[in-house]
Image (cartoon, rainbow, N blue to C red):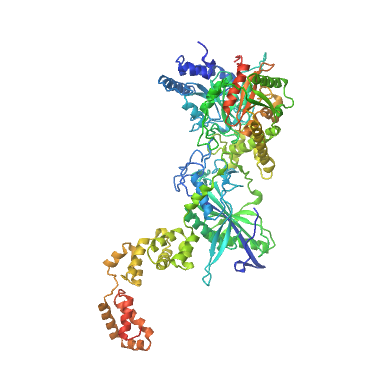
Amino acid sequence: MSIVDVRTPDPKRFIPGATGDWEVIIGMEVHAQVLSNSKLFSGASTEFGNAPNANVSLVDAAMPGMLPVINEECVKQAVRTGLGLKATINKRSIFDRKNYFYPDLPQGYQISQFKDPIVGEGKIIISIGPDRQGQFEDVEIGIERLHLEQDAGKSMHDQHPSMSYVDLNRSGVALMEIVSKPDMRSSDEAKAYMTKLRSIVRYLGTCDGNMDEGSMRADVNVSVRRPGEAFGTRCEIKNVNSIRFIGQAIEYEARRQIGILEDGGVIDQETRLFDPNKGETRSMRSKEDAHDYRYFPDPDLLPLEFDDAFVEALKADLPELPDDKKERFVRDLGLSVYDASVLVSEKSIADYFEAVAEGRDGKIAANWVINDLLGALNKAGKAIEETPVSPAQLGGIIDLIKAETISGKIAKDLFEIIWNEGGDPAEIVESRGMKQVTDTGAIEKAVDEIIAANPDQVAKVQAKPSLAGWFVGQVMKATGGKANPQAVQALVKAKLGIEE
Amino acid sequence: MTDLTSLTIAEARAKLAAKEITAVELTDAYIGAIDAANEAINAYVAVTPDRAREMAKASDARIAAGKAGALEGIPLGIKDLFGTEGVHTQACSHILDGFAPRYESTVTQNLWNDGAVMLGKLNMDEFAMGSSNETSYYGAVKNPWRAKGSNMDLVPGGSSGGSAAAVAAHLCAGATATDTGGSIRQPAAFTGTVGIKPTYGRCSRWGVVAFASSLDQAGPIARDVRDAAILLKSMASVDTKDTTSVDLPVPDYEASIGKSIKGMKIGIPREYRVDGMPEEIEALWKQGIAWLKEAGAEIVDITLPHTKYALPAYYIVAPAEASSNLARYDGVRYGLRVDGKDIVEMYEKTRAAGFGQEVKRRIMIGTYVLSAGYYDAYYLRAQKVRTLIKRDFELAFHAGVDAILTPATPSSAFGIADEDLASDPVKMYLNDIFTVTVNMAGLPGIAVPGGLDHKGLPLGLQLIGKPFEEETLFKTAHVIEQAAGRFTPTKWW
């Protein structure tokens, strides 16, 4: 693999050191667990959370004479992901054995793809921002390759005073290793890359993207250099399992390397671990201790081959991806780029929004989803999957506003009631008397009373008509917010003799 | 009453069908023979008399009900490499101590589905690595053949030495075997039996302990060509559990026995005339040529120019795959475990104690040739050689050759604990010189007895065929068998 620097050094991203500016270079290898019912080479279940060693077939336990048989669904998932990354799909790829000893690796080798991966070069567009001017900057990050491989089992060292326990449930589960090019130049870019990659696989349904369950984890390669100079020596930070930690690990590691270089030292190529408690990386093994994996083509498996029709069929069924969705939201629904970006950031949010926007005004739906729903979720620390307000309920609220049954202000109250108590929006409005008062007689009475009680204000308004709002506010207050604000406004102006 | 153990499978099949004998009688005769002989021959490492009688009883019931399978009531020995449910499956290695799988290999299941009876598990070189059956953890197998006027114990060949010896000594009607570099054909040649390694992919490897996955192939060892054809028909199948098995219908191999070879083109490769080859082997080869000519075949000289590279390339590819295949024997899940202070020491002690010297040697060679910096020079090069060897054969077949005749081995059986061979593993490896090319090319090859040498020991001829044209080999081997006769050792045990 030849490493090409495709980026122009950008001072915005430089890290100031004691002796001048530095630039950080980041590349990532992301392991994404393939969504499939059974493992890559065996029929055992992939269900998460089962009792230890419940999901283990004879193949997974590497009993003598057992042979791997490729799971076609996992191949399809890898191809779908490749298509989502706008990557070259290799119609012929080869499974290799990566040999090493570990108790949670029953075969003594991991079946992976080394020289001939199923997916070749592709790209991901990440969006950095918004900056102070509210602008986003799109950056293209190159994908080097994607290959399929087996996950290992799990060793548990804390279950017995002198022994380790092994759980093979995960042994043989399919992983996609997605390798980026060293195209990232800041921890923000790295975080945006991981976020976007997770979003893409979730849209595709090829990985659940749940980093806390280990479904996605990243090995982060970090090096630093003087802007414009050749790449420096890199360190690989293994198995970082949250987007926040990716950022922290890079920040720490870049600083560490800059410190060493500024003190006249050299960086040792090594594998490091990120300690989230201390927020630092520490050495795991040096290059000299690196394994010799003795890769060679797995003789139990023929080369993996499929034709154009196989790829085309998958392409035809591909769901809309975040970039396309964003473009459509802006183009067809008239949303701002910012709003569209927020809404497509997670497939679950986009799905929610589309359910609300269906048959309604897109912009209004976007405002409600972004400002009210996401705001409330954020405040409550909940994910969209846990929302107490369903798209149908939020849609109902919007419909009531549109029908002028309730005012915007009442709608906020209604939202809060549904958030806390649930229920049908129309029924709640009905039963709790939240309907907007459009009866001109009742409103007129209220307006008359306010005008009569506030002669000083009347005088002020007549001098400065823009103060009419004060009367509107008073009327709304007097009617418990149920008066139709347009009607109130019109009446106030008419009664005070202010020109429209 | 004739000795039931002297019946071929075809003969026993006829008597069973005619209800002249019962499967239980036949099985009992073999169990008696094993009891009497196994201490001397050491062909079986596990005998399963209870299961055998039970299976035989079920066979008799099926015969009575008119539901006999193709191998109904035929007692077979099974090489210890085949997974047999609940029964000793240890590849004759210390490291698999006590291992009996919960599964049945596809090949043996096919045999049981056809009504065959299992007598027990047969001795072999440890993990099928060896050409003399001396690397077995369970000790050497003695060849039922002895040189004229000699009491010296000879090897039966390997790795399927137990299979060949059991068949030759009438301790089973037929046996399963496997062949990675000659492990069916060389022992067959050493014991006057018939052994066929079918085309790679013809028999499923599922449930068979792996040695070198791209070369391993199961096949039968039998008393004669017809029996070998009968057995292979039952063993072979396509298997979704082995993606290297091939989805082609299994022909009725027996139907090819007795068919004419008139007009067939038999290739004689000049490269198989190796230096220092005994006169007798040369003579045997000429005799084979003469027989086939008499039967109407056309003899043509051919060239397989990359033959000389086959053995060295084989001893890179096979150990490389083995070094990886044998990594699973780590003391963690099954078989032998020797405790250590930590996991690494446990691995080291277990593997040091569990593997024999030859297995360790091949793991070392395999690990070396796959190492960073050596991979291209050894493994990759060996794979290129393999492609060239395969092409040599393709060119010969493309030029109209139907089968190739060669000697099966460069000598007859040698002595157990031969000092000359023990001192130099490469000399032992040279036993495979005529057979490895066939594995490297994935072709079918059959060894058929051609005669006895001056010591009175059997010598074999080998026929090599086109992919999945085992029928050609059976009919041609049968011609040789008709001319050469069959060979049975004089009982000394």
Residue visible at 52% across and 11% down in the picture? B2
Q: Residue furthest right?
A: B275
Q: Residue furthest top?
A: B1
Image quadrant where one finds the C terminus of chain B: top right
Q: Position of residue B414 (x, y in %)?
A: 67, 22
Give whichever of B451, A154 is nearer the camera: B451
Left or right of A420 on screen, residue B145: right
Give whichever of A105, A404 is nearer the camera: A404
Judge whether residue B3 can be spotted in this image: yes
The image shows residue A10, relative to residue B202, as above or below, that is below
Judge whether residue B153 can be spotted in this image: no
Give whichever of B159, B421 is nearer the camera: B159
Give whichever of B143, A336 is nearer the camera: A336
Determine the image quadrant of residue B201: top right
The image shows residue A131, relative to residue B456, as above or below, that is below
Left or right of B85 on screen, residue B421: right
Q: Position of residue A101 (x, y in %)?
A: 59, 42
Task: Count numbered badges in the picture.
Answer: 0
Left or right of A466 on screen, residue A344: right
Residue visible at 49% across and 60% down in the picture? A324
Q: Position of residue A136 (x, y in %)?
A: 53, 67
Q: Position of residue B97 (x, y in %)?
A: 55, 31
